[in-house]
Amino acid sequence: MSEDLTRRTVLAALAGGAVFLVKKANGQIVWQVNAARCINSRLGDTGVEACNLCTTECVVALSAVRAVNEYSKCGRCNICPAYFNISSAVNELGQPGEKLCPRDAIARKPIGKVDPEDPANNFYEYIIDEEKCDGCGKCVLKCKEPLGLGSITLRVRYDRCVNCNRCSISRACPQNALMQLPIGQAL
Amino acid sequence: MSGLPQVVVRACVVLVLLVQSAPAQAIPYQRPVDTAPQADSIGGGYKVPAVQKPLPRDYWLQVVDVVALAAAMGVSVWLVLRRRSRRWLTALTIGCLAYFGFYRQGCICPIGSLQNVVVALADPRYSIPMVVTATFVLPLVVALYFGRAFCGGVCALGAIQELVVLKPVQVPRRLDRALGLLKYVYLGLAVLFAVKPALARDFLICRFDPFVGFFRRTGAPHMLILGAAFLVAGMFVGRPYCRYLCPYGGLLAWCARLARRGVTITPNKELDCGLCAEACPYGAIERMRAVRRNCLYCARCYASCPRERGVAS
């Protein structure tokens, strides 16, 4: 009989705690990179190596962080400093010979009206392949004043992120750039 | 050296630098635009593509996970208390390991949710989703009525150890008891680190989860080695993580003491041979009776009992 009583007490305590927590529940919380803090977004091309902690620290095989090109902010440059390694030797096409991305994750294609007099003078679209990008941040660092317009940022992709209680990138990030936000604000 | 004029030295240095930089002729970079061109200025019928924003797992799928957890515990209770079938329970174990472990990659699990609950209770600004609360509460409620049904075959961490039990030795009872206290120490530490202020907060249980690396097929080398060590030890000492370290197991054991029902070996019949006690890899059978707080719902005792035939209802 006394066991029944204790069981009931424990059940009541569990139910009370659950009700308290559910009342507090505030929808889903996710991790996201705060571009205002991310050192790659802030520094720009000052000759330093890009911080690649988002690549190395993430617990999933291909990092849940990847670079995103915000197309409405992209300059669509002919020679994109994030696509080409602009300090490499120029090839016969008049473009830098090397690409910047170590995983060749950025695709370049001409868009819009083609000028028949000068076909190279065109707008170009740069699409980052989600499946290849591992968030190393090299392109983010280059697409910055004074070279680029800052359209590329590092973002968490939620189909890959396992939403760890304490994101291991956040533990390593020297700028505390990863923060937990309600899902509505994070996208 | 002092005889050589400083100017000559400097000139030489400049020359050398010039010669070195000559072959790598890079174009001086100039940004062609100062503002981003939009669809109308680009022309040619161009439309700005949408930025990819992959969404997290749908909410209803998270609810499905909780329902699957509840259903799996229900099946576990039914298989052990009614069907009394070790074979079917093994099938459930494999199924749960595949789903909660390798498919869901070990997240979310009741063991880790313990920390979220503690943080949410302690920190007024921290809130946890309802599915996490449910994940934490459900196995405890089941334990209050039927014992540790969650541990038997449902928990992915338990399941992976359950399947490697090869030739278990009986741990001396006093040593078993002493080691069993470790899980309460771990529980205390996990709570202590979880209630720290937000930036200093740490989730020990998740961080030192020995098997999550296998579920994700990637992880820090030292954690993978630790996990492998647990599995190798688990071949000879049944489910060492569950019995000696699992903090949630501590809570479940405490609830299971109050359980209304539990594993009973050949009810209504004389017990004297002790084959079940030898068969139990977890030292959960004392004086021919399964001790509910230690019983991990594996049904090995039934499988080894010569009198078990005909008991299943």
Image (cartoon, coloured by chain):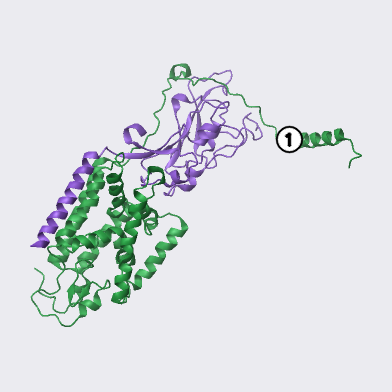
Residue A88 lies, in percent from the top left, at 64, 35
Residue drawn at (45%, 55%), measured in percent from left and top? B220
The residue located at (21%, 39%) in the rendering is: A23
Say which quadrant the N terminus of chain B sits in: top right
Please give the chain letter of the residue carrying mark 1.
B
The C terminus of chain B: image quadrant: bottom left
Horizontal and vertical percent position of residue B6: 86, 35
Let me know if residue A71 appears in the view: yes
Up the image or down, B37 lies above or below A179; here it is: above
Q: Is residue B133 above or below residue B211?
A: above
Which residue is label 1 attached to?
B21
Identify the image quadrant of residue B183: bottom left
Chain (green): B
**What is the x, y in percent for residue B159?**
29, 62
Q: Is residue B96 left or right of residue B9?
A: left
Disc 1 secondary structure class:
helix
Q: Which of the pair B146/B301 is nearer the observer?
A: B146
Q: Residue at x 35, y 71 (%)?
A: B235
Q: Quadrant of residue B39?
A: top left
Hue of chain A? Answer: purple
Residue occupying the far right of the picture: B3
Left of B7 or right of it: where is B54?
A: left
B189, A69: nearer the viewer: B189
